[in-house]
Image (spheres, rainbow, N blue to C red):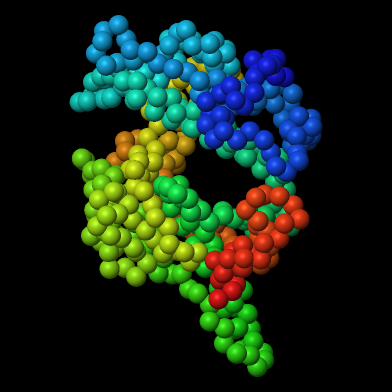
Amino acid sequence: DKVALGLRHATAEDFAMTSASGTYDRRDGVHDVDTYQDLKDAMLTVGFSEEEQMGILSVPAALLFCSNLTFVDRREHDGSSELDCNNPSLPNALDLLGVTGDALNDAICTSTIVVAGEKLRKVLSRDQATKALEAFMMATYGVLFRYIVDRVNGSITAGTLNGASSADDTAFISVLDIFGFESFETNSFEQLCINYCNEALQQQFNRFVFKLEQQEYEREGIEWSFIEFPDNQEVLDLIEKKHTGIICILDEQCRLTKCTDQTFVNKTYETCEDHPRFIGSDREKAHGCFSVHHYAGPVEYDSESFLAKNKDELPKETTDLLLSSSKPLLRELGEMLSTLSLMSSPSSADNGRIVKRSTSSLSRASVGSQFSSQLKQLRERIERTTPHYVRCLKPNDDLIPDNFVPAIIADQLRCAGVLE
């Protein structure tokens, strides 16, 4: 398989995508080469044929080679760029993507805008082309992940039983792997979303474990002493509240012209500075930062690229490139991207048909609003179930066995609201 994918002598160190962290070894004692056949057997079990498996594996292989692509200045010396034809990774990238060099160059190094019904073609600079390449790789990998999940879910769906009208009416058992709380040296939009999810699910956990248990004691007349537990509704309001929450402020800034990450920070300070869970100073504001006092502690967020990440604008050229591929799977992924773009845009019904109004950044649902909506749906689904929680605790920060550090365990329990 490695030979067919052009990876015969390649290692993680050979690709920009996998070498950036400088970490290549696993500490859990598992060797991927030993579990590769297990992976293929599992894919076969859930319905992926040998041909489909190779098609799936070829996509991340193509993206590995794409991460090594470089750009050179065009001969016109006007600041525009084009793919470096002498890059040794280019032939493998083109072969695995099933596209021509000209098609890839047009998709990555140019953009098309429509003004007054007329299409205008713009050639991108090196920095712009690099960002377009990164957006293409992220979108392709993301839609591949969704494709695999959809196929796996389809293979294990039991269908309706006992006259149930839909899948929602049937009994089910689900496993939810909850996000871990994140606080790094630099925290961006991704960490805000992850910690927002943590806040919401932590509140649900608190209400279920503490509040509902105490209500049960009251109903049954059991003597007990009231247990105070932290309620983080204030944090959720700061992040998600309509009009005044951080996500709503960010969405508003994304809709307005000439707004920047700094104008978003300024508006956030103006709206939220008196909120008890919002932390900020003139120094933080000047550096485009603000802090939120989460249930697990304060986290400072750097607003750089907040607007771009919330818009997550995927150039139409990326979808068109996938649709033009000679590889059936990549064409299918392109069709999925087109459908997802349609679904995320406001639409109206016309005799049962979905009518697409626009795919501009003004009308397309933002990443933050989609995340908030999906989190709300998840919480509603959990409310309809009988949850059983498994609290996972990390025994040490060195990722080694047989090393139990009490202070680290106590800190995690305290962050989770289990210990005062």
Provide residue 257's location: percent of width, then percent of height. 21, 41
Name the one closer to the observer, 414 or 145.
414
Residue sitting at x 68%, y 22%: 54
Q: Quadrant of residue 115?
A: top left
At 48% from the left edge and 54% from the top edge, which residue is drawn? 183
- 227 displayed left or right of 161: left
In the picture shown, does residue 291 fall above or below 327?
A: below
Quarter that holds the N terminus: top right
Q: Nearer the viewer, residue 404 or 109?
A: 404
Residue 346 can be seen in this image: no
> Which residue is located at x 33 percent, y 56 percent?
290
Whether residue 320 sits left or right of residue 120 in the image: it is right
| 302 left or right, relative to 47 | left
**Residue 194 locus on image (x, y percent):** 49, 52
Please say whether residue 296 is visible from this viewpoint.
yes
Please state the horizontal and vertical placement of residue 419, each as a whole percent of the image.
59, 74
Name the image quarter holding residue 272. bottom left
